[in-house]
Amino acid sequence: MNTSKNAIIALACAPLLALAAVPAHAGSELQPGTTTGLALGAPLPEGVYDLTLPNWGARSTNPATDLGVLTPAWIIWSTPWTIAGGRLGFDVATPVAQVSIDNPVGLNKAGWANPLVEVSLKWDLGNHFNFGVHEGVHLPVSGPLEQIGVAYNFASFMQAAALTYLNDGWNLTATVIYGTGRNGTTPGSFAPSWFNYDLTATKTIGKWEAGVVGFGSTDLSSPYAGYARQSQFALGGLVGYNFGPVNLQLKLTTDVTERNYNGRDTRFWANVIIPIWIAPTHNQQVAAKY
């Protein structure tokens, strides 16, 4: 794999907002599993990148719940500047989503989810190890998703840390993410504090990439008395292909365990990674390489 592609796969983004699969619950504001497949700890070369993240899945609730999420343009700027040796980056994303519940509920709502604005620092630690941190804020939003409690009319904060090993075609990445919540009782006014972890182990041979991904999430607080805290863990596979300027990763995951989601989720994901502009390589040091 060439240096540009390796760095692009490292996309230092904090992902899109998560939507709870059942509107009666809140859950993680960052969709669990979003960073799987990405070498999130590794620094990007100086440049501007776009990441498109669609996913769709169904949870085996009764009645069944479907959830589709799309971040059409997640823009990442990897700057020419460093702080304490770490590459400084900024990114912004505004996802949209659709939630539907089969009859007899018959709910079908779509709209904007909470925009995300983020700053990151990424370090090349040597010996093929990389480490990155993110600090982000989810901005308030109103509309159909806020009305059913899967988007929020308040700001919240998120911190992420990722450790990535890149060598001989391997991408081994573990990402942990924490988000703040808020107490309340009406839809859109509350969310628990939460913790996610995303895991990636893939191997690239030529233009092809394959491997396994896993993710888990758990609520850390109860925003109101009697709130049923949620948790889950899912496993799946990843297949990717590098088309040149565009890198495509496809993932299929399913819940192994869940608590208080009232059903297990099976989900199809895609990561579409496009470099918009990359600075000449003689002006930068690239950490993410095989």
Image: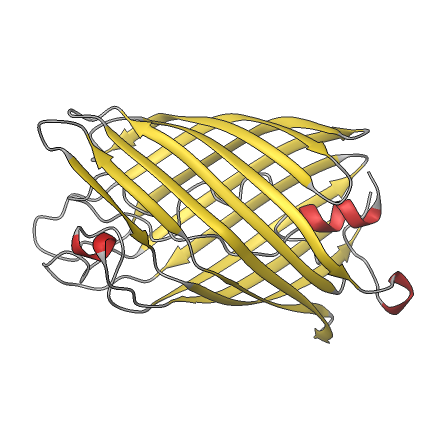
Residue drawn 17% across and 57% down?
223
Q: Nearer the viewer, residue 179 or 278?
A: 278
Quadrant assignment for the C terminus: top right
Query: Quick check: can you spot residue 71?
Result: yes
Quadrant assignment for the N terminus: top right
Q: Where is residue 141 in the image (x, y as percent from the top left)?
A: 29, 64
Which quadrant would residue 165 be assigned to in this image? top right
Q: Position of residue 57 (x, y in %)?
A: 37, 30
Q: Say whether residue 89 is left or right of residue 151.
A: right
Residue drawn 25% across and 23% down?
60
How does the figure colour the protein chain or chains? secondary structure
Q: Say whether residue 205 is left or right of residue 116.
A: right
Q: Which of 8 and 105 is in front in this view?
A: 105
How many numbered marks appear?
Answer: 0
Q: Nearer the viewer, residue 234 or 108?
A: 108
Q: Position of residue 240 (x, y in %)?
A: 66, 30
Q: Nearer the viewer, residue 184 or 53?
A: 53
Q: Position of residue 257 (x, y in %)?
A: 33, 27
Residue sitting farthest toward the right: 282
Q: Say whether residue 187 is left or right of residue 231.
A: left
Query: Quick check: can you spot residue 128?
Result: no
Q: In this picture, is 120 found above or below 20?
A: below
Q: In this picture, is 270 found above or below 119?
A: above
Residue drawn 53% across and 63% down?
134
Residue drawn 61% across and 54% down?
50
Q: Say whether residue 63 is left or right of residue 152.
A: left
